[in-house]
Amino acid sequence: MKTIFYLAIGIWIVAALGLSGGQSFALQETTQDPLISITAVNQPLGEVLDQITGETGYQFNLDSKWEDHRVSATLNQIPLERGLKRLLRSLNYSIIWESDNTVTIVVYGKSEPGRDQGAVSFAPPPQEVPAEPEPALEVEPEDEQPSDRSETEALEPPSVGGPPSIEESEEAEPADAGGQDSDEPVERGRMVE
């Protein structure tokens, strides 16, 4: 039992050291981003990337049709990634960082003016839909006198022949109304008062 306990503790310690070592390695790698200092005024992007290669040792892959794209920027001791983003701000692009100090820049086209100010919704602005008037409910004024019709009959449209006569109600058979004792006659499955 002690052996299993010590083995579990040992595995836990090795895992904890491995994770903390991995985190410090990741932090170390991001802080080692080389700093660049470049002043480019209306220069071709390919030439500016060649200058950055001379400063940092990073190699850049760029489609040849974008090598002549003119860029302007003044960068003073700025990390490489931030500097590339500034140089490419007029383009719609992706930066792919490869493990052997190679950076591939994929350009999809020029970005539209004002598009770098934040996210823009492609949904049209909401338009107000005119509300349909609700049909008015006809409410009959309630009389304070008791009604001759039950609540169910009051909700049904009036019959063409009028209320049943005494002769019709005598033909009806008595029935049990929901388990309650009632001596009132029932006509066609409903109570008649």
Image (cartoon, rainbow, N blue to C red):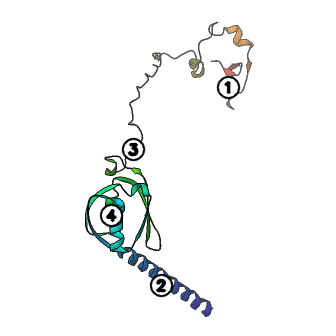
Q: Nearer the viewer, mark 2 or mark 4?
A: 4
Label 1 packing within 10 angstroms: few (<14), some (14-19), many (20+): few
- Label 3 sits on a secondary structure element that is loop
Give the secondary structure at mark 1: loop
Q: Which residue is mark 2?
A: 17
- Whether 128 is drawn above or below 136: the answer is below
Picture layout, residue 32 above or below residue 126: below
Looking at the image, residue 55 lies above or below residue 131: below
Q: Classify 10 Å Cα crowding around label 4: few (below 14), some (14-19), many (20 and above).
A: many
Q: How many marks?
A: 4
Q: Quadrant of the C terminus?
A: top right
Question: What residue is shown at x 35% (from left), y 75% (from top)?
Answer: 31
Calculate the distance from the C-alpha at mark 1 to the C-alpha at mark 4.
101 Å
| Label pair 1/2, CB-CB below 8 angstroms | no
Q: Which residue is tagged 3?
A: 121
Numbered disc 4: secondary structure: helix
* Residue behind mark 1: 182
Residue that extends furthest to the bottom in the rendered view of this protein: 2
Instruction: Look at mark 4 in the image and give the residue it sits on.
Output: 48
Q: Earlier in the sequence, mark 1 or mark 4?
A: 4
* Label 2 CA crowd tier, 10 Å (few <14, some 14–19, many 20+): few
